[in-house]
Image: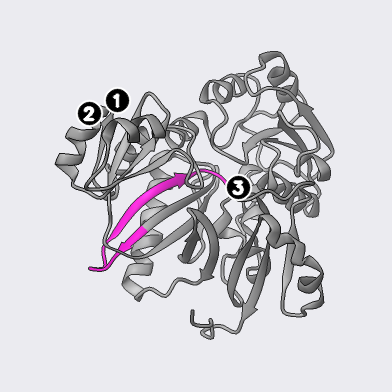
Amino acid sequence: MASASVHPLPPGSTIGIMGGGQLGRMTALAAARLGYKCHIFTPETDSPGEQVSAAATIADYEDRKALKSFAGSVDVVTFEFENVPAESAEYLAEHALVRPGAQCLAIAQDRLKEKDFINKTAPTTPYRKVTSAEDLAKAADEIGRPAVLKTSRMGYDGKGQVLIAPDCDYAAAWAAMGAEIGILEGFVDLDCEVSVITARSPHGGWVTYPAVENRHVNHILDTTLAPARLPGDLAEQAVAIAHDLADALDLVGLLAVEMFVTRDKRILVNELAPRPHNSGHWTMDACPTSQFEQLVRAVCGLPLGSVEAHHDAVMKNLIGDDVTGWPDLLADPGARLHLYGKAEARPGRKMGHVNRLYPKGQLPNG
């Protein structure tokens, strides 16, 4: 186990990654390039992260015996997704260096805590806590309809979300949401959705990638355009918001900040993710330092890398059966293919992504 006073962690050290999905996989690959080993902790066998890592612990995230053993085998612990129980992160911190800290996870995995936290630094959509169908009806009267009802915890990629239309059956909507506590969020007069990824070191240094535009299909990220087509002042504001939120969290690692840009050119923060993010995959081919290498640098106390893009880029997710087009993508000299090693393609499942690069200022329309 490493002491918090030891910086930087030298190559040959072991990074513990909570979570075995594709974000863990790509982090482990980036770590290996810098001479680090990775140890994955996940409940799943043959996970994408396990396939490319030096070691894996297959156990439940709440298995304290396994967590303690894992902590003793690594030099720093980080996360590839934020829904590891905060109590498990706190327990790990008693035995290992944990970056980012448990408090970052506790905020990001609870939408109500997250919205309350964000509003101390930046505006969000209007929202209300709801605990019953009666609560929901009252909140909808206050916020207006249409609105979106979401679970307060564990929802992602559109899961646990219900549209609240003007003619809504509140009892049915509450049952469909499927949780004891929800959050009702007002609709936004949306121009586009953007995100910003910032990295912050143990010493307080930071670097931030440019804002990118995200386009969704069926609530799942489909395409990212880098950079976002924003006026300069709005792009600078988005970067400043991400930086301020990372500072407020006292984060060490990566923070992805999803934001709405309204038609009247205001920025509203939607969600936080203290980890690598799907909208940062373009950095793997268009920047000197990918978001995954940046995470490794931050949690190991290394100098942060350059975020200056040498090309504009379009990232396209391969969802479900999209992955069957891999032979054509490999034959396309302009496509940079990244596959995640998942055995089965299912509807809505992220199987890989492809990046395409363009000269600066020549991002295609559409």
Secondary element type, mark 2: helix
Q: Are the residues tagged 2 and 1 within 8 Å (C-beta)?
A: yes
Q: What amino acid type should be assigned to the residue bearing mark 2?
A: Asp
Q: How is the image coloured?
A: one colour
Magenta segment range? 260-275
Q: Which mark is residue 131?
A: 1
The CA distance from mark 2 to mark 3 is 43 Å
Look at the numbered disc 1 and give the secondary structure of its residue: loop
- Relative to 76, does residue 268 appear above or below in the rendering? below
Q: Is residue 102 above or below residue 277?
A: above
Q: Residues within 10 Å of mark 3 (few under 14, many from 20)?
A: many
- Give the residue type at disc 3: Ala
Which mark identifies residue 147? none
Residue 206 can be seen, yes or no: no
Residue 90, percent across and down? Answer: 54, 22
Taking 335 as reference, is 362 left or right? Answer: left
Q: At 38% across and 38% down in the image, what residue appears?
A: 150
Query: Does the magenta-highlighted stretch encompass residue 297?
Result: no
Q: Position of residue 272 (x, y in %)?
A: 44, 45
Depth order, front residue of 327/64: 327
Mark 3 or 1, nearer chain start: 1
Mark whose residue sits in front, 3 or 1: 1
The amino acid type of the residue labelled 1 equals Thr
Left or right, residue 38 beside residue 82: right
Q: Earlier in the sequence, mark 2 or mark 3?
A: 2
| Mark 2 in CB contact with mark 3 (< 8 angstroms) | no
Question: What residue lies at 71% left-to-right and 38% top-to-bottom?
Answer: 20
> Which residue is under mark 2?
135
In the image, which disc is placed on residue 298?
A: 3
Residue at 45% across, 38% down:
160
